[in-house]
Amino acid sequence: MEYSQRELERIYWLKMRLTSRLLIKSVKEERDQASASGLKGAALGARDWAQLAHMQD
């Protein structure tokens, strides 16, 4: 099957849009995971500080 130049350009730009959207989605997922990990770390750190403070009472 042969494609016209216009069809090839359309396919190219559709692929570029899809790739861009997938990349953005991937970056958002990584950011969300890092944020969740950071919150968990902060919560654990706060718990550890609370335990230390309680031990010193």
Image (cartoon, rainbow, N blue to C red):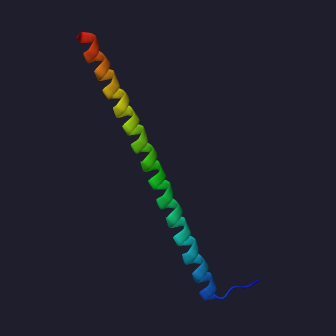
When the figure is inspected, residue 19 is found, relative to residue 11, above or below; the finding is: above
Residue shown at 42% from the left, 49% from the top: 31
Indicate the quadrant containing the C terminus: top left, top right, bottom left or bottom right: top left
Left or right: 44, with 19 as reference point: left
When the figure is inspected, residue 40 is found, relative to residue 6, above or below; the finding is: above
Indicate the quadrant containing the N terminus: top left, top right, bottom left or bottom right: bottom right
When the figure is inspected, residue 8 is found, relative to residue 25, above or below; the finding is: below
Left or right: 3, with 34 as reference point: right
Q: Nearer the viewer, residue 57 or 35?
A: 57
When the figure is inspected, residue 18 is found, relative to residue 26, above or below; the finding is: below
Total labels: the figure holds: 0
Q: Nearer the viewer, residue 50 or 30?
A: 50
Q: Quadrant of residue 35?
A: top left
Residue located farthest toward the right when viewing the structure as drawn: 1
Residue shown at 32% from the left, 18% from the top: 51
Q: Position of residue 2 (x, y in %)?
A: 73, 85
Residue located farthest toward the left when viewing the structure as drawn: 57
Residue shown at 37% from the left, 38% from the top: 39
Q: Quadrant of residue 11?
A: bottom right
Left or right: 40, with 19 as reference point: left
Q: Position of residue 15 (x, y in %)?
A: 58, 72
Q: Position of residue 41 (x, y in %)?
A: 38, 32
Q: Quadrant of residue 47?
A: top left
Residue shown at 54% from the left, 77% from the top: 13
Q: Nearer the viewer, residue 24 or 16?
A: 24
Q: Position of residue 34 (x, y in %)?
A: 42, 43
Q: Nearer the viewer, residue 15 or 53?
A: 53
